[in-house]
Amino acid sequence: MSNSSSISHFLLLALADMWQLQLLHFCLFLGISLAALLGNGLVISVVACGHHLHSPMFFFLLNLALTNLGSILTTVPKAMHNSLWDTRTISYAGCSAQLFLFVFFISAEYFLLTIMCYDRYVSICKPLHYGTLLGSRACAHMAAAAWASAFLYALLHTANTFSLPLCHGNALGQFFCEIPHILKLSCSHSKLRELGLVVLSASLYLGCFVFMVFTYVQIFRAVLRISSEQGRHKAFSTCLPHLAVLSLFLSTGTFAYLNPSSIFSPPLDLALSVLYSVVPPALNPLIYSLRNQKLKDAMRKMITPGFQKP
């Protein structure tokens, strides 16, 4: 294929060659996606309907659940379809839409996790100013900024990726459309634009990471100054779910994107891709609900209307 204009579709990575394994992959993806839909849908419903949960922490948690739903619905249904019908194709337009939506939701999740660090910092280090610094208008502005930034970031990457000439076939080494695997098909000799986007992405993500580290250093210093053991435990318990979700997001993404090709085999690369793109959206609601008593009580009341906390 001489250039991208001649490409009408891409070939995604086949998860397995045998029908039995393809069916197993379908069932696995179905189970994970149902768990993600149920967990995140329950979080969204509980926070939206529970008036006592209308606080900044739960507002950002609701937005985080929306990104989880979006990211898993972007990649998993097509992978399930391909496994069930023994096909690998995805249209050019479908691939560009999938890439845009995946980058959009993943970026929005990262920005929201950064904002949630600030929420925990103000809650623990500046509790008297919590209502002022994190009022309803301020929270809405921060969430809107996270979504808008993610939209522009995804649009920039999608436009750049699909404006490059593609002359190395149309087979992708991934079960969904992802930027690094599409760039491998490019025959462009102009690296300046790609370098600029890499620098922009690294600066943006590294800046958020430094901010997270700084806020948690301040949080831990403030918690250690609390005299009562019960107060320290309560403060830590509000941070642990966020830290667990953040660690899962960063560790799986880092391993998937920065793994040395000389060490990791293609099956392991595929496993890491599933780990960072599919597993976190299913686990995040569980992590938050296990450590947050208010959220657990609200979920029990929604599932069992007659429930009363003893």
Image (cartoon, helix red, strand yellow):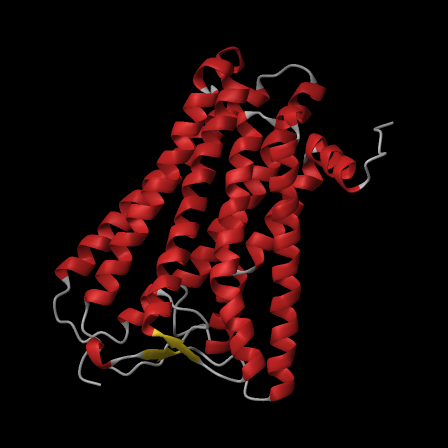
Q: Position of residue 82 (x, y in %)?
A: 51, 78
**Residue 163 is at least partly visible in this image:** yes
Q: Quadrant of residue 9?
A: bottom left
Say if 56 sits above or below 189 in the image: above
Nearer to me, 54 or 32: 54
| Position of residue 43 in the picture relative to residue 278 (left or right) | right
Image location (x, y in percent) of residue 302: 75, 38
Q: Residue 34 at what x, y percent from top left?
A: 65, 59
Q: Nearer the viewer, residue 29 or 224?
A: 29
Question: How many numbered dots are placed on residues in this image?
Answer: 0
Above or below 269: residue 129? above
Q: Which of the pair 32/113 is nearer the observer?
A: 32
Location of the N terminus by quadrant is bottom left
66 left or right, relative to 26? left
Check the picture and name the quadrant holding the C terminus.
Answer: top right
* Residue 167 visible, this orientation: no
Q: Is residue 110 left or right of residue 151?
A: right
Q: x, y (%) of residue 47?
A: 62, 34
Residue at image coords 50%, 39%? 63
Q: Residue at x 66, y 56 (%)?
A: 35
Q: Measuring 49% from the left and 33% from the top, which residue is drawn there?
A: 116
Q: Quadrant of residue 140?
A: top left
Asked whether, in this view, residue 155 is left or right of residue 87, the answer is left
Residue at coordinates 52% horizontally, 58% vertically from top-left?
A: 72
